[in-house]
Image: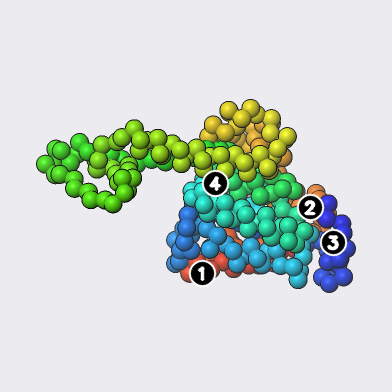
Amino acid sequence: MASKLSAWNRLFRGSKPLVHTLRLQGMIQAGRGGGFGPQPLSLEAVERELARAFDKRVLPDAVAITVNSPGGSPVQSDLIYTRIRTLAKETGIPVMTFAEDVAASGGYYLLCAGKDGIYARDTSIVGSIGVVSGGFGFVDALKRLGVERRVYTSGKSKSQLDPFLPEKDEDLALRQRLLNDIHSSFKGVVMESRGAKLKLGEERAFSGEVFTGREAVEHGLIDAVGEVRGVMREKFGEKVRFRNFGGRRMLFGAPFSSDANA
Protein backbone atom coordinates (compact mmCIF):
# COMPACT_ATOMS: atom_id res chain seq x y z
CA MET A 1 0.00 0.00 0.00
CA ALA A 2 2.89 2.36 0.76
CA SER A 3 5.69 0.71 -1.25
CA LYS A 4 7.07 3.94 -2.78
CA LEU A 5 6.98 5.71 0.56
CA SER A 6 8.61 2.76 2.30
CA ALA A 7 11.47 2.52 -0.20
CA TRP A 8 12.28 6.20 0.37
CA ASN A 9 12.11 5.78 4.13
CA ARG A 10 14.44 2.80 4.21
CA LEU A 11 17.26 4.95 2.90
CA PHE A 12 17.10 6.90 6.16
CA ARG A 13 15.73 4.62 8.89
CA GLY A 14 16.55 1.02 8.05
CA SER A 15 14.62 -1.81 6.46
CA LYS A 16 11.83 -2.43 8.98
CA PRO A 17 8.46 -0.79 8.25
CA LEU A 18 7.44 1.89 10.75
CA VAL A 19 3.91 2.76 11.86
CA HIS A 20 3.13 5.75 14.05
CA THR A 21 0.20 5.19 16.39
CA LEU A 22 -1.87 7.86 18.09
CA ARG A 23 -4.75 7.61 20.58
CA LEU A 24 -7.69 10.05 20.55
CA GLN A 25 -9.62 9.42 23.73
CA GLY A 26 -12.23 11.17 25.85
CA MET A 27 -15.05 13.66 25.56
CA ILE A 28 -14.53 16.03 22.63
CA GLN A 29 -14.54 19.59 23.93
CA ALA A 30 -12.49 22.76 23.74
CA GLY A 31 -9.49 23.26 26.01
CA ARG A 32 -6.38 21.40 26.99
CA GLY A 33 -7.01 20.44 30.60
CA GLY A 34 -4.29 19.72 33.12
CA GLY A 35 -3.38 17.65 36.14
CA PHE A 36 -4.05 13.93 36.30
CA GLY A 37 -7.81 13.83 35.66
CA PRO A 38 -9.60 13.12 32.37
CA GLN A 39 -8.27 15.31 29.60
CA PRO A 40 -10.55 16.99 27.03
CA LEU A 41 -10.11 15.87 23.44
CA SER A 42 -9.56 19.01 21.38
CA LEU A 43 -7.33 20.21 18.57
CA GLU A 44 -5.37 22.25 21.08
CA ALA A 45 -4.71 19.14 23.15
CA VAL A 46 -3.62 16.89 20.28
CA GLU A 47 -2.19 19.12 17.53
CA ARG A 48 1.41 18.72 18.73
CA GLU A 49 1.19 14.94 18.77
CA LEU A 50 -0.54 14.93 15.39
CA ALA A 51 2.31 16.97 13.90
CA ARG A 52 4.87 14.56 15.36
CA ALA A 53 2.98 11.51 14.09
CA PHE A 54 3.04 12.97 10.55
CA ASP A 55 6.64 14.21 10.77
CA LYS A 56 7.96 14.62 7.20
CA ARG A 57 11.51 13.96 8.38
CA VAL A 58 10.55 10.46 9.48
CA LEU A 59 7.76 9.63 7.03
CA PRO A 60 6.33 6.45 8.57
CA ASP A 61 4.70 3.87 6.35
CA ALA A 62 1.34 4.68 7.95
CA VAL A 63 -0.33 6.50 10.81
CA ALA A 64 -2.79 4.37 12.83
CA ILE A 65 -5.20 6.34 15.00
CA THR A 66 -7.21 4.73 17.79
CA VAL A 67 -10.48 6.47 18.68
CA ASN A 68 -12.29 5.95 21.98
CA SER A 69 -14.84 8.75 22.34
CA PRO A 70 -18.61 9.14 22.72
CA GLY A 71 -18.44 12.49 20.92
CA GLY A 72 -18.93 16.06 22.06
CA SER A 73 -18.21 19.36 20.34
CA PRO A 74 -18.96 19.31 16.59
CA VAL A 75 -16.47 22.13 16.08
CA GLN A 76 -13.58 20.34 17.80
CA SER A 77 -14.50 17.11 16.00
CA ASP A 78 -14.24 18.90 12.67
CA LEU A 79 -11.02 20.70 13.60
CA ILE A 80 -9.27 17.45 14.53
CA TYR A 81 -10.65 15.61 11.50
CA THR A 82 -9.58 18.42 9.17
CA ARG A 83 -6.07 18.56 10.65
CA ILE A 84 -5.61 14.81 10.17
CA ARG A 85 -6.76 14.95 6.56
CA THR A 86 -4.60 18.01 5.84
CA LEU A 87 -1.49 16.35 7.28
CA ALA A 88 -2.22 13.16 5.35
CA LYS A 89 -2.49 15.07 2.07
CA GLU A 90 0.63 17.14 2.74
CA THR A 91 2.79 14.13 3.58
CA GLY A 92 1.21 11.36 1.51
CA ILE A 93 1.16 9.12 4.59
CA PRO A 94 -1.72 6.59 4.67
CA VAL A 95 -4.10 6.92 7.62
CA MET A 96 -6.12 4.13 9.22
CA THR A 97 -8.45 4.54 12.18
CA PHE A 98 -9.54 2.04 14.83
CA ALA A 99 -12.52 2.22 17.17
CA GLU A 100 -12.07 0.79 20.65
CA ASP A 101 -14.98 0.80 23.14
CA VAL A 102 -16.92 3.55 21.41
CA ALA A 103 -16.57 5.82 18.38
CA ALA A 104 -19.97 7.48 18.34
CA SER A 105 -21.21 10.87 17.18
CA GLY A 106 -18.09 13.09 17.15
CA GLY A 107 -16.05 9.96 17.79
CA TYR A 108 -17.32 8.48 14.52
CA TYR A 109 -16.59 11.84 12.86
CA LEU A 110 -12.93 11.31 13.83
CA LEU A 111 -13.07 7.69 12.67
CA CYS A 112 -13.95 8.98 9.19
CA ALA A 113 -10.45 10.47 8.91
CA GLY A 114 -9.18 6.95 8.14
CA LYS A 115 -9.42 7.16 4.36
CA ASP A 116 -7.12 4.14 3.99
CA GLY A 117 -9.13 1.91 6.30
CA ILE A 118 -11.59 2.09 9.20
CA TYR A 119 -11.72 -0.73 11.75
CA ALA A 120 -13.40 -1.66 15.03
CA ARG A 121 -13.78 -4.61 17.36
CA ASP A 122 -16.84 -6.87 17.13
CA THR A 123 -18.34 -5.28 20.24
CA SER A 124 -17.29 -1.66 19.66
CA ILE A 125 -20.13 0.87 19.56
CA VAL A 126 -20.04 2.83 16.32
CA GLY A 127 -22.23 5.42 14.60
CA SER A 128 -24.69 7.87 16.19
CA ILE A 129 -24.52 10.11 13.13
CA GLY A 130 -26.71 12.88 14.42
CA VAL A 131 -26.79 16.04 16.50
CA VAL A 132 -28.38 16.53 19.90
CA SER A 133 -29.09 19.58 22.04
CA GLY A 134 -30.84 19.67 25.37
CA GLY A 135 -31.54 21.72 28.46
CA PHE A 136 -34.05 22.39 31.22
CA GLY A 137 -36.96 24.76 31.69
CA PHE A 138 -37.44 26.53 35.03
CA VAL A 139 -40.52 28.66 34.27
CA ASP A 140 -42.88 26.80 36.63
CA ALA A 141 -40.20 26.56 39.31
CA LEU A 142 -39.81 30.33 39.34
CA LYS A 143 -43.58 30.78 39.65
CA ARG A 144 -43.72 28.48 42.67
CA LEU A 145 -40.89 30.41 44.29
CA GLY A 146 -42.53 33.74 43.54
CA VAL A 147 -39.54 34.89 41.50
CA GLU A 148 -39.96 37.15 38.46
CA ARG A 149 -37.50 36.84 35.61
CA ARG A 150 -36.35 40.19 34.18
CA VAL A 151 -34.30 40.26 30.95
CA TYR A 152 -33.25 43.32 28.97
CA THR A 153 -31.87 42.95 25.45
CA SER A 154 -30.93 44.88 22.37
CA GLY A 155 -31.84 42.60 19.49
CA LYS A 156 -34.99 40.50 19.51
CA SER A 157 -33.17 37.17 19.34
CA LYS A 158 -30.73 37.71 22.22
CA SER A 159 -32.91 35.96 24.80
CA GLN A 160 -33.97 33.01 22.66
CA LEU A 161 -34.18 29.67 24.50
CA ASP A 162 -33.69 31.31 27.89
CA PRO A 163 -34.50 28.44 30.32
CA PHE A 164 -36.30 30.86 32.64
CA LEU A 165 -38.69 32.09 29.95
CA PRO A 166 -41.51 30.18 28.18
CA GLU A 167 -40.50 28.49 24.92
CA LYS A 168 -41.61 30.20 21.72
CA ASP A 169 -42.23 28.55 18.36
CA GLU A 170 -39.69 30.79 16.65
CA ASP A 171 -37.07 29.83 19.25
CA LEU A 172 -37.65 26.14 18.61
CA ALA A 173 -37.50 26.73 14.84
CA LEU A 174 -34.13 28.45 15.26
CA ARG A 175 -32.71 25.60 17.32
CA GLN A 176 -33.91 23.02 14.81
CA ARG A 177 -32.40 25.01 11.94
CA LEU A 178 -29.01 25.03 13.67
CA LEU A 179 -29.19 21.31 14.45
CA ASN A 180 -30.14 20.46 10.87
CA ASP A 181 -27.27 22.53 9.47
CA ILE A 182 -24.69 20.89 11.74
CA HIS A 183 -26.17 17.48 10.90
CA SER A 184 -25.80 18.27 7.20
CA SER A 185 -22.07 18.94 7.69
CA PHE A 186 -21.69 15.64 9.57
CA LYS A 187 -23.47 13.76 6.79
CA GLY A 188 -21.18 15.35 4.22
CA VAL A 189 -18.09 14.07 6.03
CA VAL A 190 -19.54 10.56 6.26
CA MET A 191 -20.47 10.49 2.58
CA GLU A 192 -17.02 11.74 1.59
CA SER A 193 -15.42 9.02 3.73
CA ARG A 194 -17.70 6.07 2.99
CA GLY A 195 -19.43 6.99 -0.27
CA ALA A 196 -20.54 3.90 -2.18
CA LYS A 197 -19.38 1.67 0.68
CA LEU A 198 -22.34 2.80 2.77
CA LYS A 199 -24.99 0.09 2.48
CA LEU A 200 -27.66 1.66 4.67
CA GLY A 201 -30.28 4.03 3.38
CA GLU A 202 -29.65 7.63 4.42
CA GLU A 203 -32.72 7.76 6.63
CA ARG A 204 -31.36 5.03 8.90
CA ALA A 205 -27.66 5.76 8.49
CA PHE A 206 -28.10 9.38 9.60
CA SER A 207 -30.80 8.76 12.22
CA GLY A 208 -28.40 8.78 15.19
CA GLU A 209 -28.64 4.99 15.58
CA VAL A 210 -25.62 3.15 16.97
CA PHE A 211 -24.27 -0.22 15.84
CA THR A 212 -21.83 -2.84 17.04
CA GLY A 213 -18.58 -3.17 15.13
CA ARG A 214 -19.85 -6.34 13.49
CA GLU A 215 -23.03 -4.57 12.34
CA ALA A 216 -21.01 -1.55 11.21
CA VAL A 217 -19.06 -3.75 8.79
CA GLU A 218 -22.30 -5.15 7.36
CA HIS A 219 -23.70 -1.64 6.89
CA GLY A 220 -20.51 -0.18 5.40
CA LEU A 221 -19.84 2.25 8.23
CA ILE A 222 -16.40 0.66 8.68
CA ASP A 223 -14.23 -1.60 6.50
CA ALA A 224 -13.50 -4.56 8.74
CA VAL A 225 -13.13 -5.92 12.25
CA GLY A 226 -9.56 -5.53 13.47
CA GLU A 227 -7.14 -3.95 15.92
CA VAL A 228 -4.05 -1.86 15.33
CA ARG A 229 -1.21 -4.33 15.70
CA GLY A 230 -2.92 -7.20 13.93
CA VAL A 231 -3.95 -5.08 10.94
CA MET A 232 -0.56 -3.38 10.65
CA ARG A 233 1.29 -6.71 10.76
CA GLU A 234 -1.03 -8.05 8.10
CA LYS A 235 -0.26 -5.06 5.88
CA PHE A 236 3.44 -4.52 6.60
CA GLY A 237 4.71 -7.84 7.93
CA GLU A 238 5.69 -9.25 11.30
CA LYS A 239 8.78 -7.03 11.56
CA VAL A 240 6.80 -3.78 11.53
CA ARG A 241 7.83 -1.32 14.25
CA PHE A 242 5.46 0.94 16.16
CA ARG A 243 6.06 4.35 17.63
CA ASN A 244 3.32 5.60 19.94
CA PHE A 245 2.26 9.23 20.36
CA GLY A 246 -0.05 10.45 23.11
CA GLY A 247 -2.73 8.70 25.14
CA ARG A 248 -0.38 6.40 27.04
CA ARG A 249 0.80 8.41 30.05
CA MET A 250 -0.07 11.96 30.98
CA LEU A 251 1.91 14.44 33.06
CA PHE A 252 0.08 17.72 33.75
CA GLY A 253 -1.86 17.29 30.52
CA ALA A 254 1.24 16.62 28.38
CA PRO A 255 1.41 13.23 26.61
CA PHE A 256 4.52 11.08 26.46
CA SER A 257 5.49 9.08 23.38
CA SER A 258 7.35 5.79 23.26
CA ASP A 259 8.80 3.30 20.80
CA ALA A 260 7.70 -0.32 20.65
CA ASN A 261 8.89 -3.15 18.44
CA ALA A 262 6.39 -5.78 19.52
Q: Secondary structure at mark 1?
A: strand
Which of marks 4 and 2 precedes in the sequence? 4
**Quadrant placement of the C terminus:** bottom right
Marks 3 and 1, how far apart at CA: 34 Å
Q: Earlier in the sequence, mark 1 or mark 2?
A: 2
Instruction: State the residue at coordinates (70%, 63%).
Output: 54
Q: Amino acid at mark 3?
A: Ser
Report the residue at 83% width, 63% height from top: 16
* Residues at marks 4 and 3 touching, judged by CB atoms closer than 8 Å: no
Q: Which residue is label 2 attached to?
A: 233
29 sits left or right of 227 in the view: left
Which label is found at residue 106? 4
Mark 2, secondary structure of its residue: helix
Image quarter of residue 120: top right
Q: Amino acid at mark 2?
A: Arg
For image coordinates 29% across by 36% down, the residue present is: 167
Whether label 3 touches label 1, CB < 8 Å: no
Residue density around tag 2, few if under 14, some if 14–19, many if 20 or more, within 10 Å? some
Q: Which residue is mark 3?
A: 6
Question: Disc 4 or disc 1, which is closer to the eye?
Answer: 4
Residue receiving disc 1: 251
Say few, some or many: other residues with alpha carbon within 10 Å of mark 1 (under 14 / 14 to 19 / 20 or more): few
Residue furthest out toward the front:
155
Picture coordinates of residue 14 (x, y %)?
Answer: 85, 69
Instruction: Using the numbered discs, state the Cα–Cα distance from disc 4 to disc 1 in whole angstroms.
Output: 26 Å
* Tag nearer the camera, 4 or 3: 4
Disc 2 + disc 4, Cβ < 8 Å: no
Q: How is the image coloured?
A: rainbow
Amino acid at circle 4? Gly
